[in-house]
Image (spheres, rainbow, N blue to C red):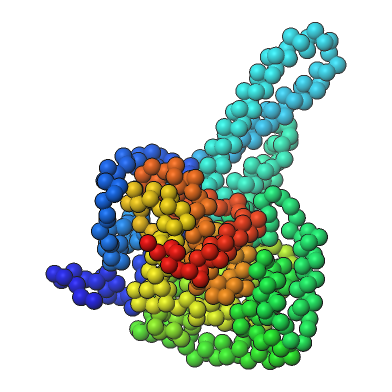
Amino acid sequence: MSSDGGKKQFWKRNTAKVPGSIQHVYGAQHPPFDPLLHANLIKAGNKPPSTSTPGKPKKATTFQEFESITSDAWDVGDDDDELLAMAAQNLNIEVVMETANKVIENHSKLQERRQQQQDEVFEPEEKEEEEGHEDDEEEQEEEEEAAETTAELSFSLERLPHSDSRLVKSHSEAPIGSPKEMIGERSALHRQQSLPHRPVIPLVARMADQNTSGTPAMTEREASRLDKFRQLLAGPNTDLEELRKLSWSGIPRQVRPITWKLLSGYLPANAERRASTLQRKRQEYFGFIEQYYDSRNDEHHQDTYRQIHIDIPRTNPLIPLFQQASVQEIFERILFIWAIRHPASGYVQGINDLVTPFFVVYVFEYIEEEVENFDVSSLQEEVLRNIEADSFWCMSKLLDGIQDNYTFAQPGIQRKVKALEELVSRIDETVHRHMQQYEVEYLQFAFRWMNNLLMRELPLRCTIRLWDTYQAEPEGFSHFHLYVCAAFLVRWRKEILEEKDFQGLMILLQNLPTMHWGNEEVSVLLAEAYRLKFAFADAPNHYKR
């Protein structure tokens, strides 16, 4: 493809980049949208609706033109994104500590007031009636003041680094008592500050199987399903077709590791061959490490390794598990070896996300406790090597089916985004026309959906549940994912139609409120996606104009 007037082709603007590498996808490397932080920006950035004639056909926009005109989908500068700059602001620790102390003092006053009321129960009723109204007013004022300072503290914590938030947490959760007790408690808190703290895991980062309704993860029905899995897996030759049918509606945590290995094709169906296969593939992977990993600093490979090294700390930054040095080293080796063995695509941003579900699932194979704060250094070295090799091979199996998403100019993503646009135009024309009216292009938000397989849109626990079905579904990652994206977009129909400008739509579509999602929401999404697949997969002309 040629360029005009000496203008560089968009993938050649930085000569240090190797073919197949891309610029940062907007928002892809950052935590979910915080409406408190961005409320002012939203108000300031509102613009009147487009006055263009709805019936006038729009000129087709090329993929290269998208890159040059769309700052929301492509972040060329890496440091000029106002939203990210706002999110990166940190409050002074002194301000936060002052707010925390104020919360403690207000709670202490409230506790004293309640104690006094209890002491006054034995006084004459006439006196209680005279002072009751005044006490209620004072208590209400103190409660309102405590609530305000608590809200200020919560807002402050959201804008602090993890280390600062842990420090304040110890103050805000301290037992409340009398002023004399507070002196002893504060001195104890100073001693506790020198001790390590378990980080607070936000809801979006919790990975336990859960439903938002609060129902237990292991119901009687789930226990029955677990028995069916175990019976099926215990046979000498596992019926993979039956295993896929059973896995489509979710896989119990206890049998998820071996089930994923079987469904991905990493393990054979024959039980007797599995141990030897695992041993051979693990040895093969570490043979690649010995052969290739030392070349990461060579001139030919240093750009690839540098980009991997930059992206790894950004992978799931809210989960302490992935911030451990040993885990990041594992990810670096996995991604570098994959890039070296797949020169047609090399490493592309977004592939780093695809390792995390496999890693978490295979860590669960060896532990019973929650994984978010788990210290992997407590595992034996051989166990860590097994987890690393298994994660590499299963990720490789996944990428083999969608590698055209990451080859030169990423043609697979372009085709899927176009198919998504055509599909949505048929299943919900109102939503489609609404986005057309405000000039929202599907590539601006759906590129990330395809590039990261919705991993930036959903909590990791939901991604793991989603991948249960993807592994059970034929061409789940390459074909069924299209219908999941369509169902996901239409799921937010009401919110989309309420937005009346380009900026509001883009902020919504790139920061959809899914942090509370659990198994129930994912199951509903998958059911709708299956309905769309049943209606359109065998008749593609139905969604073509």
Which quadrant holds residue 39?
top left
Q: Which residue is found at the position 41% from the left and 60% from the top?
A: 421
Residue 161 at what x, y percent from top left? 52, 53
> Which of the two residues, 145 or 494, is positioned nearer the viewer here?
494
Asked if residue 298 is positioned above or below residue 71 in the image, the reply reads below
Instruction: Determine the residue located farthest toward the left in the rendered image.
Output: 5
Which quadrant holds residue 246?
bottom right
> Which of the two residues, 6 or 384, is positioned nearer the viewer here?
6
157 relative to 369 in the view: left or right: left
475 relative to 79 in the view: left or right: right
**Quadrant in which the N terminus appears:** bottom left
Q: Which residue is found at the position 60% from the left and 51% from the top?
A: 516
240 relative to 302 in the view: left or right: right
Asked if residue 233 is positioned above or below residue 414 in the image, the reply reads below
Residue 36 at what x, y percent from top left? 48, 42
Residue 417 can be seen, yes or no: no
Instruction: Determine the residue located farthest toward the right in the rendered image.
Output: 122
Q: Which residue is found at the position 53% from the left and 69% from the top?
A: 480
Residue 470 at what x, y percent from top left? 58, 70
> Which of the two residues, 117 or 397, is positioned nearer the viewer here?
397
Residue 503 at what x, y percent from top left? 37, 47
Asked if residue 57 is positioned above or below residue 64 in the image, the reply reads above
Disc count in the image? 0
504 relative to 358 in the view: left or right: left
Residue 429 can be seen, yes or no: yes
Q: Which residue is found at the position 50% from the left and 81% from the top?
A: 400
**Quadrant in which the C terminus appears:** bottom left
